[in-house]
Structures are given as C-alpha cells and as structure tokens.
Image (cartoon, rainbow, N blue to C red):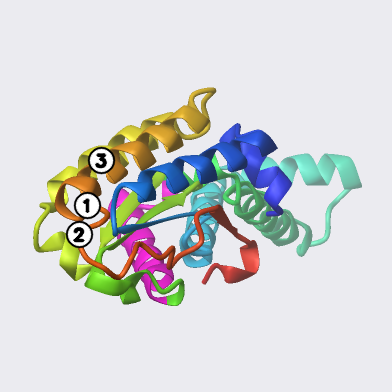
Amino acid sequence: MKKSKMLRRLKLPEKALENIKAAVDKAEERTTGEIAVAVTVESARYSMYELLFAVTAGAVVFAVMLPFAEILQGILDRLMWGAPVWCLPAVYGFTCFGVTAVLFLAANVPAVDRLIIPRRVRRLTVYNRALRYFVESGVYATRGRSGILIFVSYMEREVRILADTGVSARIPGETWNSIASDLAEGLGTENAEASFIRAVERCGEILSEHFPAGGDDSGNPDELPDALVILEDDECV
C-alpha cells in the first residue's frame, strides 16, 4: 500500500504529517527523551490464516453438497441428455475450488482479516513488528536510553508504545498502554490526526517529568527523525 492510500485509510491529510511532526518537535523541546512515530499497513501477511479460512470454507461447501449428489446428477442428466460420469465430480471440484479462491481473495480485506485471525495472534504479531522497528530505527540506542516508539498497525487496529530501558525503569507500562488505547480508538476516524497529536503530547509530558531538558551540559540533540514514518508493504514480513 502506497503512502497516499495509507493516509486515506487513516483519514490523515498531507497537512497532518506536518502537524504531527511539529507536535513531536514541540514535545521533545522539553525533554531529553526521543519520540518516534511509525505506521504500517499490517504487521504480517497472515497468508496461512487466510488460506486455512478459505480451504475450510471450501470443505464445508463440499460437505453440504454431498447429500444432494443424486439431485445434482438428475439436473445434469436433464441438461445434457445423460451426463458423463465425470460431470458430477467436476461440478463438485469447480464449486469448491471457486469458493476457496473467492474467499481467499476476500480474506485480504482488512475487515475480514480481523474476523478470521485470532486477536491473540494479531496482538503478538504487532508487538513483534513494533519491536523489530524499534531496533531497526535506532530507538533503542538513544543517549540515556530514553527513546520511545509509537507504533501503529492499521489492519489490526493495534497500537504499541515501546519504551527503552531508561524509560521503562521509571514509568510503568500501564501508562503507555492507556495512551495506546486512546490512539487506537481514533484510527481511521475524523479524529485520527488529533489522536496522533494527543498521544505525542501525552508522551512528551510524561518524558519531560522524568527526563527534563537542560538537565546536563550536553545539550538536547535530536537523535531520531520527528516525522511520522509510513512503512511500505515490502517492509512487512
């Protein structure tokens, strides 16, 4: 999914990216901590679950059709003046294959994916993807180990906020979970931009309490990009 399409799904205009970046800039002025924000279309392909759903549905259709074999054979005989013996198996095969193919394609719709993929699996997958980006983006390597990552996975409607060791030692995880839940509620709505900015502001307020700016003589360098990073499809595993 391209950047423009992702923004439409999230209901974020191009201007919103500038506003979110400005919010991160402002939040980091008051703290030596760093805030990174990233969005991905989905945290994994989930092809196994989509295929399992489609094949299971095809098997159910086959089982439902079995008791009607005699009726179907009679219909074929009338249509073809005595259908060859292979016609009935062909009807079963094409029907089940068609159902499987159509449902496998339908399973790529985000709303359907959220129905067929267990919530536990989605939550764990988003966490693992967020953890991967946490390392890849360098959030884990900030001075004072005071970086946090706000990670959004659109398809799963999940938000994870990961904090480095310096932050997690002072601030309990429940604090970040509360902010993440509020942001998740705003995803894909008209309040999406405001939800992102509010999450950044709340994170900045918390970091400023425990990692205030001007606490030492080394200044307050900007160690991470402040812009909202949109991960393309090929960055999903």
Left or right of 59, for residue 198: left
Asked if marks 1 and 2 touch (Cβ < 8 Å), the reply is: yes
Mark sitting earlier along the chain (3/2): 3
Residue 40 visible, this angle: no
Specify the amino acid type for callout 2: Gly
Q: Quadrant of residue 27?
A: top left
With 102 as the anchor, is 161 left or right in this view?
left
Q: Residues within 10 Å of mark 2 (few under 14, many from 20)?
A: few
Q: Residues within 10 Å of mark 3 (few under 14, many from 20)?
A: some
Cα distance, mark 1 to mark 2?
Answer: 6 Å
In the image, what residue occupies the spot 20% across and 56% down?
A: 211
Amino acid residing under circle 3: Glu
Q: Disc 3 designates what residue?
A: 205
Residue 215, numbered circle: 2
Q: Is residue 121 magenta?
A: yes
Can you tell which of label 3 and label 2 is closer to the viewer? Answer: 2
Coordinates of residue 192 in the picture (x, y in percent)? 50, 31
Q: Amino acid at mark 1?
A: Pro
State which mark lies toward you, 1 or 2: 2
Q: Position of residue 186 (x, y in %)?
A: 43, 30
The front one of 66 and 191 is: 191
Magenta residues, as a range? 116-135
Task: Determine whether label 1 and label 3 are within 8 Å by CB.
Answer: no
Q: Tell me how far mark 3 sits from mark 2, CA to CA.
A: 16 Å
Task: Name which residue lies at 10% across and 52% down.
Answer: 172
Q: Which residue is mark 1?
A: 212
